[in-house]
Structures are given as structure tokens and as C-alpha cells.
């Protein structure tokens, strides 16, 4: 009986161990640094991003059909101080009718030489070229030649489009590079949104079935504005403001949607998926990107919460009223805010809100869209009252 009892315990233990969840996979997390002109805001942003993101993919060089070549004005000293591995990204606009291979290779070699002279030692080069499917064979030939000119120690990767999945040239193209970065955001009509997590997962699974080499997913942490034209075709405004009138519709990738995809990928990653690359490093004055607090929370898999609250500061009976985001999730401005007050001589709302005053109550109502980043605060109004009951204040989404 003792033997049978021990055997039963052993069998039960095996059953329990089989039911335990395997630990979530650790996916490498990297960042695109996509500003064409570096500013003092890069220093704190890079410092804050250091603990969550292993490598930096730096927009370094661009070629456009009419404008020609343009270098991003980076801060090499800042990158040396940062110390993370660097990948130089060369953007070849998809509207280029023909890739002048000699010129492109010469430009890349000069860039690498200049970076080396500045004390930078990139570990890789990424080519970002939105070639149409019909041009993929020629693109593959160019990449083969480029690979031969680069040092063997330097990795070569490409930014890739889901549309390429329909091309028979894709498997051969992927054999010419060491890795690929599948862009799963803003790849179709932006009017349909920047990101669809279910579609992104399907693309990732299909890509995994085609490639035999490591690949990354480029995920969105940004927004754009769509500017309406008379033709009905929208113009996309991103980092650079466009001086054009008309209606503006803001689109922003939803952090909770993206976090859901990341959780699925951690739980059951495609076998060739090497990691995630976030577009893009946000700066403090970046009005169309998640805050670094929200980006870091999504990358780590933290629970997301905006936790909006009202806060008042009183001096001589004058109250300054502000909205505070005490959570880790950027949030739209709330629709309505109310405060219980005593007798008030005067009160007013600041930009973005309007005020309605009734007996014992101040009601602030939103009249324009806005966003309060995680950890930030924003003044919404003032009041001169005998008292304000902060415990009686409410934020209504």
C-alpha cells in the first residue's frame, strides 16, 4: 500500500507539472530613433529608455526621388555615451524609379566610414525600401551585391512589407539578408487605422512560415493626422507639420491593443521571431507618440492604467485647478470634470474646456480633443471660492 500511495503521489505530481503554464518568452526589444534633426530632448529620452530596450536602430540616411540624399543630424557623442548596439537605417524611398546600385553602396560606405571616424561602431545596417512586388527580384540582386561589400561582421537587415507575402520572389529575397523587420502598422489605407492586432498576428505567422532566418516585428507607438483634400485622398502628417488648411483627423495606435498582441507573442512566439522593434523613440515634445512611460509599460507587459485625478492648489483663496495622470497609460482628456465648492466670487476654464457654475458645483466640459501623457499634469481652470472639496471632485471619461 505504501508503494501504491507513493506511486499515486508521483503520478499526481506529473499531472500537475504538465498543467503548469510555461513561462512567457523573453522577446528582445529595440527602438527606432527616427528624428531627422537631433535636439537636447534626445538625451533624457535615451536615458529613460535604456533599461527596457536593448538596441537602437538609427535613421541615418535617406534618398528621395527629387530631393536626393539627406543625412540625419545625429549626436554621436550621445550615442557613444549610451553604449547600446547601433544599427544604421538607410531609407530608400519607394517612389525611386531605379536604385543606382553604385551610388547607394558608395553612400552607405561613406556613412559607415564617417560614423567610424566619429567613434561609432554599428553592428548592422538596415535597408528600408518599400519596393513593389514586381521589383523584388531586382531588389534582391541589389541586396546580394550590398552584402558582398559589407564586412562579414556587420549584419544586414531589411524593413519588409506584408504585401510581399504574395510574391514568389520573397523566399529568395529573405535569403540575401541576415534578418528582416516586418512592418505591421500603417501598411494599407491609413483611414482604416494604424494597427490591427489580429491582422498583425496573421502576418507574423505567415512570415514565420516563409523565412528561415530571424525576423522582428516593427510595432507602432505613434500617431498621425489625416488632412482632408478636395480630391478626397488624405495627406498624412507625421513628425513634420504640413501647412495646409482643412479638417484634421488624429489617429493614434492604441497601447492596450498593441499590448494584447505582445502578450500573445510572448505566450506563443513564432519560432523565427527574434524580437520587437518599436517605432519610435518619443521625445518630451513629441505630440504624436506614446510617452516613454507608456511605451516602457507596454514593452514590459505591465498592467496599464491612466488613473486621472483632479488636484487643486490654493493661495489666498485663489485655487488653481489641474488634471493629473497618475498612471502609466496616456489618456485622452476626460469629457467632464466636477468639483464641489463653497461660495465662489469668480471662476473660469482654460483652453480646451468650458465652465458651467451652479450652486455648490463647478463643471468643466471638454470642447476640444487632447491627450494627457502618463505622469503629466495640465491646468484646466481657476476659481476664487471660500473652499473647494477636493474629495468631492470627480473625473468623468
Image (spheres, helix red, strand yellow):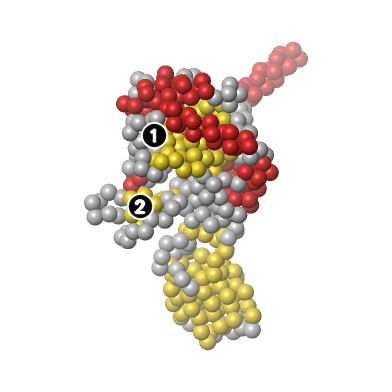
Above or below: residue 94 compared with residue 173 = below
Q: Give the x, y percent position of residue 35.
A: 51, 47
For residue 41, which quarter of the picture?
Answer: bottom right
Q: Identify the residue shown where x is 52% and y is 50%.
A: 37
**Is residue 143 in view from this perspective?**
yes
Q: Nearer the viewer, residue 231 or 350?
A: 231
Q: Nearer the viewer, residue 265 or 272?
A: 272
Q: Where, quadrant-wise, is the N terminus in this rendering?
A: top right
Most extreme residue toward the right is 2
Q: Give the x, y percent position of residue 303.
A: 58, 46
Q: Identify the residue shown where x is 39% and y is 44%.
A: 67
Query: Nearer the viewer's eye, disc 2 or disc 1?
Result: 1
Q: Which mark is residue 226?
A: 2
Position of 212 with respect to 30 (left or right) is left
Q: Nearer the viewer, residue 358 or 103?
A: 103
**Disc 1 secondary structure class:** loop
Above or below: residue 139 compared with residue 381 = above
Q: Identify the residue shown where x is 48% and y is 24%.
A: 146
Above or below: residue 262 compared with residue 151 = below
Is disc 1 surrounded by few (<14), some (14 to 19) or many (20+) residues within 10 Å? many
Above or below: residue 359 compared with residue 262 = below
Q: Report how far apart the C-alphas of labels 2 and 1 lie in the structure.
A: 21 Å
**Disc 2 secondary structure class:** strand
Q: Give the x, y percent position of residue 235.
A: 33, 50
Q: Nearer the viewer, residue 271 or 123?
A: 123
N-terminal of the pair, mark 2 or mark 1, is 1
Q: Give the x, y percent position of residue 75.
A: 60, 46
Q: Identify the residue shown where x is 42% and y is 36%.
A: 92
Q: Report which residue position mark 1 lands on.
A: 130
Position of 260 with respect to 227 (left or right) is right
Amino acid at each position: 500500500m505504501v508503494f501504491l500511495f507513493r506511486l499515486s503521489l508521483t503520478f499526481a505530481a506529473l499531472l500537475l507539472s504538465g498543467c503548469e503554464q510555461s513561462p512567457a518568452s523573453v522577446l528582445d526589444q529595440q527602438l527606432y530613433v527616427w528624428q531627422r534633426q537631433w535636439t537636447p530632448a534626445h538625451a533624457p529620452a535615451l536615458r529613460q529608455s535604456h533599461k527596457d530596450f536593448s538596441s537602437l536602430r538609427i535613421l541615418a540616411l535617406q534618398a528621395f526621388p527629387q530631393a536626393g540624399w539627406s543625412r540625419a543630424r545625429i549626436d554621436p557623442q550621445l550615442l557613444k555615451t549610451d553604449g547600446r548596439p547601433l544599427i544604421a537605417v538607410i531609407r530608400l524611398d519607394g517612389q525611386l524609379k531605379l536604385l543606382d546600385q553604385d551610388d547607394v553602396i558608395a553612400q552607405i560606405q561613406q556613412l559607415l566610414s564617417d560614423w567610424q571616424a566619429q567613434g561609432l561602431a554599428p553592428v548592422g545596417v538596415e535597408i528600408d525600401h518599400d519596393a513593389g512586388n514586381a521589383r523584388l527580384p531586382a531588389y534582391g540582386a541589389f541586396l546580394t551585391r550590398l552584402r558582398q561589400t559589407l564586412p562579414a561582421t556587420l549584419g544586414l537587415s531589411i524593413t519588409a512589407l506584408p504585401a510581399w507575402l504574395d510574391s514568389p520572389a520573397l523566399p529568395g529575397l529573405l535569403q540575401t539578408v541576415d534578418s528582416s523587420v516586418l512592418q505591421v502598422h500603417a501598411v494599407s489605407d491609413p483611414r482604416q487605422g494604424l494597427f490591427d492586432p489580429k491582422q498583425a498576428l496573421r502576418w507574423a505567422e505567415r512570415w514565420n512560415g516563409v523565412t528561415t532566418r530571424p525576423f522582428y516585428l516593427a510595432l507602432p507607438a505613434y500617431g498621425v493626422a489625416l488632412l482632408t483634400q478636395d480630391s478626397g485622398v488624405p495627406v498624412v502628417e507625421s513628425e513634420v507639420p504640413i501647412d495646409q488648411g482643412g479638417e484634421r483627423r488624429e489617429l493614434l495606435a492604441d497601447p492596450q491593443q498593441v499590448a494584447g498582441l505582445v502578450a500573445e507573442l510572448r505566450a506563443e512566439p513564432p519560432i523565427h521571431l527574434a524580437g520587437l522593434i518599436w517605432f519610435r523613440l518619443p521625445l518630451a515634445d513629441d505630440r504624436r507618440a506614446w510617452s516613454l512611460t507608456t511605451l516602457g509599460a507596454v514593452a514590459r507587459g505591465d498592467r496599464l492604467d491612466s488613473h486621472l485625478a483632479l488636484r487643486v492648489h490654493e493661495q489666498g483663496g485663489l485655487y488653481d485647478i489641474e488634471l493629473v495622470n497618475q498612471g502609466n497609460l496616456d489618456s485622452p482628456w476626460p469629457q467632464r470634470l466636477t468639483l464641489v465648492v463653497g461660495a465662489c466670487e469668480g471662476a473660469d476654464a482654460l483652453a480646451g474646456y468650458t465652465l458651467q457654475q451652479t450652486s455648490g458645483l463647478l463643471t468643466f466640459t471638454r470642447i476640444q480633443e487632447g491627450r494627457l501623457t502618463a505622469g503629466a499634469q495640465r491646468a484646466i481652470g481657476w476659481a476664487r471660492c471660500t473652499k473647494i472639496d477636493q474629495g468631492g471632485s470627480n473625473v468623468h471619461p
